[in-house]
């Protein structure tokens, strides 16, 4: 029975993570044309070069060759105290993007990393910032939004780290990512 309850908690955490991503997607606006969501890796890599060089395109800039699930190495996951293996699932927010910009991680708890546009970052910062929850000064351009997501901006990357399920140290996760950008 405990195993089943653990599986149900994992499923609920995954569902909660997806709901949180949907909330973030509702705030996301992209002028990109609708394309087939099953783009190949080579098409993603080609788009990656364009996204990395055109910061005014309205498309999120994603590091690691548009592979958001490469944001945390297994060594980093282990040093952050996650139960390994950590299940990582890449996705697109919004769905119309020609490449992945979000990675949902699931272990004991769940969290997601979303690379967004400058416009999305500024909207969150200007309209949904939670002033009563100070963000760490060592993370550039960081702030918490009203949902408890930690946002930051560095080197043309605009990133939201969401925490769903059992608490993780969202600031340590964010710091690990920010140091590589």
Image (spheres, grey):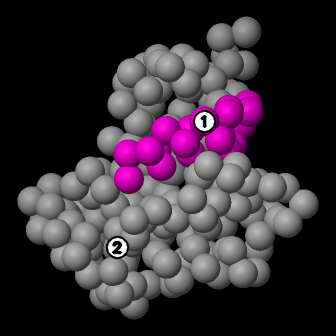
Which label number is shown at residue 97?
2
- Percent coordinates x, y for residue 52 in the rendering: 25, 70
Q: Earlier in the sequence, mark 2 or mark 1?
A: 2
Q: Nearer the viewer, residue 167 or 153?
A: 153
- Residue at the image point whose x is 15% and y is 61% from the top: 45
Residue 170 to residue 154: above or below: above
Q: Within 10 angstroms of label 2, few (less than 14), some, or many (20 or more) residues?
A: many
Residue, disc 1: 172
Which of the 4 image quadrants contains residue 175? Answer: top right
- Residue at the image point whose x is 38% and y is 53% from the top: 181
Quadrant where the image shows the N terminus: top right
User: Dot 2: what SS?
Assistant: loop
- Percent coordinates x, y for residue 150 in the rendering: 66, 54
Q: Which residues are magenta?
A: 163-181
Residue extending farthest to the right is: 132
User: Dot 1: what SS?
Assistant: helix
Q: Is residue 32 visible?
A: no
- Residue at the image point whose x is 64% and y is 81% from the top: 123
The CA distance from mark 2 to mark 1 is 28 Å
- Residue at the image point whose x is 38% and y is 45% from the top: 180
Which of the 4 image quadrants contains residue 167? Answer: top right
Count of numbered marks: 2
Looking at the image, do the residues carrying marks 2 and 1 touch, with CB atoms under 8 Å apart? no
């Amino acid at each position: 029975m405990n195993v089943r309850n653990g599986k149900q908690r994992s499923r609920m955490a995954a569902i909660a993570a997806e709901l949180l991503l949907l909330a973030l997607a509702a705030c996301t606006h992209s002028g990109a044309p609708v394309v087939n969501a099953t783009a190949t890796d080579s098409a993603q890599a080609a788009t990656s070069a364009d996204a990395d060089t055109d910061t005014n395109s309205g498309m999120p800039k994603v590091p690691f060759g548009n592979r958001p699930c490469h944001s945390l190495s297994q060594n980093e996951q282990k040093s952050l105290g996650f139960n390994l293996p950590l299940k990582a699932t890449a996705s697109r927010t919004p769905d119309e993007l020609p490449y992945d910009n979000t990675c949902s991680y699931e272990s004991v708890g769940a969290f997601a990393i979303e690379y967004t546009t400058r416009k999305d970052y500024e909207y969150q910062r200007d309209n949904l910032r939670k002033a009563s929850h100070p963000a760490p000064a060592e993370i550039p351009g960081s702030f918490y939004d009203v949902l408890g997501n930690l946002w930051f901006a560095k080197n043309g990357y605009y990133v939201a780290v969401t925490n769903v399920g059992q608490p993780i140290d969202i600031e340590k996760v964010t710091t690990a990512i920010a140091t590589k950008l």
